[in-house]
Image (cartoon, rainbow, N blue to C red):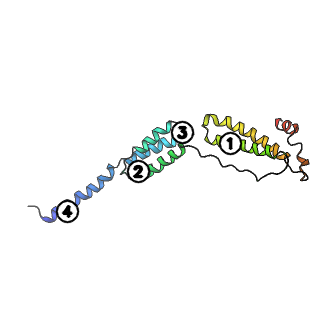
């Protein structure tokens, strides 16, 4: 005959064994390690976040069970990757204060054109961004030349008179 205390010992032993075996049922840490390896490999190769290769990494993180202890880290990675793959915010623009004097209207129009190009560059896809950047650089050069000659009478803009002239073009080509 088995005593009551033997039943308790047997039940305690089974509970202890169950606690030892149950953590092994969580496949999340193993899946997380595989997803992290894929992530690291793409980062080391310098693969841009919008590349389709990242779809498999996101899917690997997403496959980690919701009740796994590894899921919180997977959710953080998923959120970060999705944020990087989203639409780029427009770049902030800094512009100097108002101008007075000759050619102010031309300066204002040129600033507006440069601002428009800068915003466009922030929203463009990677393939076209370099082309827009070249247009923006040319726009800024023209703006610098216009601002250099847009001094009101008597404010000493005479020393800048050659900045917008042919000397600037020759010097930049050297």
Quarter of the figure with the N terminus: bottom left
Q: Give the left or right position of residue 142, taking residue 24 as reference.
A: right
- Residue 17: x, y in percent? 26, 55
Q: Secondary structure at mark 2?
A: helix
Residue 32 placed where, x, y %? Answer: 42, 46
Q: Which mark is residue 116?
A: 1
Q: CA distance from mark 2 to mark 3?
A: 23 Å
Q: CA distance from mark 2 to mark 1?
A: 43 Å
Q: Are dots 1 and 4 in contact, CB under 8 Å?
A: no
Dot 1 or dot 3, earlier in sequence: 3
User: In terms of depth relative to the viewer, which is nearer, 92 or 52?
Assistant: 92
Q: Earlier in the sequence, mark 2 or mark 3?
A: 3
Give the foreground label among 4 and 2. 2
Q: Quadrant of residue 174?
A: top right
- Residue situated in front as seen by the camera: 80 or 68: 80
Label 3's element?
A: loop
Q: Which label was assigned to residue 9?
A: 4
Q: Position of residue 51 (x, y in %)?
A: 53, 37
Q: In the figure, 89 relative to 53: above or below?
A: below
Assess disc 4: are there few (<14), some (14-19) or many (≥20) residues with their C-alpha within 10 Å of its C-alpha: few
Q: Earlier in the sequence, mark 4 or mark 2?
A: 4
* Left or right, residue 10 beside residue 31: left
**Which callout, 1 or 4, points at the residue further toward the start of the chain?**
4
Give the CA distance from mark 1 to mark 4. 78 Å
How many neighbours does mark 2 have within 10 angstroms: few (below 14), some (14-19), or many (20 or more)? many
**Residue 7 in the figure: left or right of residue 44:** left
Residue 71 is labelled as 2
């Amino acid at each position: 005959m088995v005593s009551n205390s033997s039943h308790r010992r047997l039940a305690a032993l089974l509970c202890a064994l169950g606690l030892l075996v149950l953590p092994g049922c969580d496949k999340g840490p193993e899946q997380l390690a595989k997803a992290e390896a894929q992530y690291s490999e793409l980062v080391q190769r310098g693969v841009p976040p919008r590349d389709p290769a990242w779809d498999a990494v996101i899917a690997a993180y997403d496959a980690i069970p919701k009740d796994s202890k590894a899921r919180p880290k997977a959710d953080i990675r998923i959120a970060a990757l999705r944020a990087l793959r989203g639409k780029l915010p427009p770049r902030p623009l800094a512009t100097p204060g108002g101008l007075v004097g000759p050619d102010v209207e031309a300066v204002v129009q040129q600033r507006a054109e440069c601002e428009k190009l800068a915003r466009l560059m922030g929203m463009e896809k990677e393939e076209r961004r370099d082309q827009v950047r070249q247009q923006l650089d040319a726009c800024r050069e023209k703006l610098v030349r216009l601002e250099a000659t847009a001094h009101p009478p008597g404010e000493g803009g005479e020393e800048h008179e050659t900045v917008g002239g042919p000397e600037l073009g020759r010097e930049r080509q050297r």
